[in-house]
Amino acid sequence: MAHSNLKKSHIFPRRLEYLPLTFRLLLFSFFMLFLLGAEVVDAQQDSEPADNGATETTSETFPASFDLIPVGIKLGDRTANPGTLVRGSENGIQAIDFSNWAIAYNDVLKALQFTATPLADGTIELRSPAAVIRLDPSLLDTDPQLGLVFTVTQIRDLLQIPVEFDISEYAIVLTPEWLRASGSLGLTGRYSLPERPIVLEGLPRIEAPNLSFSAIGQEIRVTGGGDRPTEYEGDLVGIGTFFGGSWYSKIDQRDLTDPRSWQLEEFQYLRQTPSTDYVIGDQRTFWPEGSGRYTGVSIVRRFGFQPPTEFTNASDGFNPQQRLNSDRLERDIRGRAEPGTLVQLVNKNGNLIVGEQLVDQSGIYRFENIPSASTNKGRGGIAGNRYELRLYPNGQLSAFPEIRAAEFSSLPGQLSKGTSALLLSAGFERLRQADTFFGSLSDDLQGGFAYRWGATDNLTLGTGLFYDGQLKGLGEFFFQPGRLPLRITGAATFNSDEQRGEQQSDLRYDLNVRFNPGQRFDFEFDKDELSERIRTRWDVSDNFRLAFNSNSSDQIAQATWRLFPGFSTRVGWSFNNKALEGGFDLSGALGDLLIRNSVTFSADQSPDWRLFSRYQNLTLDHRLRDRQIATEVEYFFRNPEALVDTGHSVFVRYQSSPNEDNEARTNELLVAGWRYEMNSTVGDRLSDWIVDLGYGVGTQGAGWQIAVTTNQLLGLNLTARYQDISLTGNESSFSLLIGSDAILSPNFSLKPSRFERLRTEGGIVVIPFIDANRNGVQDETETAYLQGIEAETADFLFLINEQPINRFSEYEPDLRRRGIFVRLPPDTYRFDVDPAGLPLGWQTTQSAFAVEVSAGSYTPIYVPLTRAYIVAGTVVNAQGKPLGGVRVEAVNQNNPQERSLSVTNGAGIYYLESVGTGVYDLFIDGKPAKPGQLRIEIDAEEFTELDLRL
């Protein structure tokens, strides 16, 4: 009966139906003998159980009333298996001896969504979205017909899952706890997927320029007024690329009118890679008391780690200490827990499950090589990693876990165990001379080496030797124990010839100790050969804080008490002055009134008062310090419809300070005026226009005060100031600062930018253009097409290493008239154009590239855009009936490789997408269609309807 529902095709595969009848009958005979043989073997196994070392149970082990019965399996209210065989019995009202029913092993795993992984010790790890369990298969029984089985008791005890039998549904019902606890922490966590390798092979490769003059900047400073002569000064800066690195030059123009006074301020060639840096020219020394104008050659080699990507100080050029640091620190996280506990390591940034372990009989869990915060945003790194451990008893993710802290951070300078870095440098001090452009080099050779090594996970050691007129040694250490919130750093130089007063010092050192066991307590100790400093903070409660600060001049103990939200008071004692000091802070809002007030009294009882208040359109800013007063009241004109400031305001400003020549007198100045500030439209968020126009009256006289700042005049940064009166004098003066930045390569662009960052960064410039002749090359008449593209949409239109641009760059794309500029660290990237983000009706023939980025230049990426048309219609035969399932193909006459294909649906409708301009031959299943040609002009409609006949 069990085989009565099998179809013939289930017994005889379709391929056997083509064999001769005699041969098929012979196969059928062998098949029947196989079934009979299996029944004989089963009967023998029933009478004589095999002894192979594994537990095997015969049907006689179960009660005699048990038999194979068909039932369903439900997971809560949902049917997991509509029908399967189990060994059990029922009387029409309820299950008989239900706890001993046997259910096939595979049926249980499928219903509970478990996957099984055999382990080396012979056990099996069962894993589901809700639980991880380690199972010993020798505990299970083997049924002659069902194979490996769970009894109901074993499901309840080993898997910790309630089981019932619903006779009305005639189904076994499994009700795991996670069905009722879908909001558990474990069920909401997402697994951190391993990073996919970025595929660059086979992509068109765009090389960075080997030699370029990428940007130039000129700053002009003009000052004068009154009896002073007018002075003209400036700085001229140039940046470019030279064979994989950047070159940088800065000229100090002491007198713009006399080129003979110009001097070379700095020249540097810098090539930085993830493993090695090369520096030639002016640079910082790696030793602490080095010359400020050191010219030489340096090489940094890193073993086993990459340096951090620093966007904030990129314009400063080569920083030797920074390039010896690691972008992240890898450490082991370990601990103890009860056997059977599932331990998850979770990155709290995004609730990502980094790893998980099921604790074995040893009771120890360990997660190895876990990275701390990564600063390499330029390579797609995460800005920071904050971890915690979640411990689930018995592997049940539906249970509420025990939370354990697992946070650690990178100590600047600390390296992972086994990694190291070596720095070699040699050069001379460059001396300025008034009559020469370059200056001269000193006679004494300077230089040395520095080596830093990750000795353990907790300790990094450094040593070095250098010569700058005297041979000196360098030592350093970075210590951060894994289980203590303690950080200790120390550095020392030996045989220094620097004088301290009348004495000679043979040792210079700097020691820093920080103990931070939690958010409520922080202790820091600094000491060098000259002084020591102590800073301690203890938050006794949310409303009360104790602090102690000590330095060479004073020791101050202070208590801060927040009486209620928005108001706190503080009082302290100065041990040196033997006097009280303190103050209070008040901040809050009452309707439209906003107020922030801070008052501090120092040990000499002099007040320091800062008050800011705003009521609707009116603001008050007041500052009192060291007997100097500055108060300003400003009224903003607001657009009543848009409810935003128009940028216009009027102000009254009062200033006073003691007269340096006569302390009995006070200098005073009152200024009334108008101010305009227009919001920024560029990525650096600087205001496009700031205009101050005021007239002042004071003890020194009366006169005008005018200031203008803008970056909207022909690409210039301009700041101009003029005044007839000031707080301390009545002599007129003026100053003019003009800055002009220009991107020269790959195309000219005159617009303010912080281009000096190209010293350590490179970038790409994306140039979409309308490819009218479809040759894939931007011709002279084909300009950049940026219509409809903004900084926000560019983040998603273009992908770098399969991620949005904002994962790789600290700054938004800079949209200019000739392209989209994106700053990136030097590397080779995969660049993709997302077709879904292209302007409607446009397409690109090439959407992925391998792009090389070098410091000092922008690598151009030309994206040819062609019109994308849609052609649709109905295909009919000679009798006019629609043809379904036929292939419609359009082939470009000039380029047969360019073709579009569609298969008609049941109604005979075809749909050809991404059809470009040109003349196309039309085919239906390889045969010429009627009409046989299609012509699409550049000004055609985006959608063309064309019916075809075969």
Image (cartoon, rainbow, N blue to C red):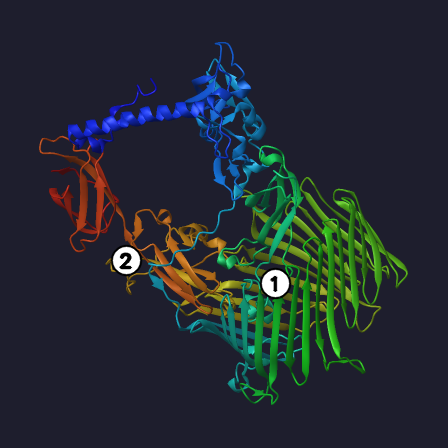
Residue 771 badge: 2
Q: Is residue 360 above or below residue 771?
A: above
Say which amino acid is labelled 2.
Asp
Q: Locate residue 862 relative to residue 306 in the image: left or right.
A: left
Distance Cα–Cα, label 2 vs label 1:
51 Å
- Within 10 Å of disc 1 (Cα), the crowding (few <14, some 14-19, many 20+) is many
Give whichever of discs 2 and 1 has the lower sequence position.
1
Q: Locate residue 547 relative to residue 148 in the image: left or right.
A: right
Q: How many marks?
A: 2
- Residue at horizontal 58 percent and vertical 36 percent from the top: 395
Q: Is residue 521 above or below residue 155?
A: below
Q: Locate residue 127 relative to residue 335 in the image: left or right.
A: left
- Within 10 Å of disc 2 (Cα), the crowding (few <14, some 14-19, many 20+) is many
The residue singled out by tag 1 in the image is 415
Q: Is residue 288 visible?
A: yes
Residue 24 badge: none
Q: Give the position of the N terminus as an image quadrant.
A: top left
Q: Give the position of the C terminus as an image quadrant.
A: top left
Percent of width and height locating residue 661: 80, 74
Say which amino acid is labelled 1.
Leu
Percent of width and height locating residue 828: 42, 62
- Residue at horizontal 77 percent and vertical 45 percent from the top: 567
The residue lying toward the viewer, choosing from 235 and 667, is: 235
Helix, strand or loop for disc 1: loop
Percent of width and height locating residue 268: 52, 76
Q: Locate residue 84 relative to residue 408 in the image: left or right.
A: left
Residue 771 found in image quarter:
bottom left
Helix, strand or loop for disc 2: loop
Name of the residue lying farthest toward the right:
578
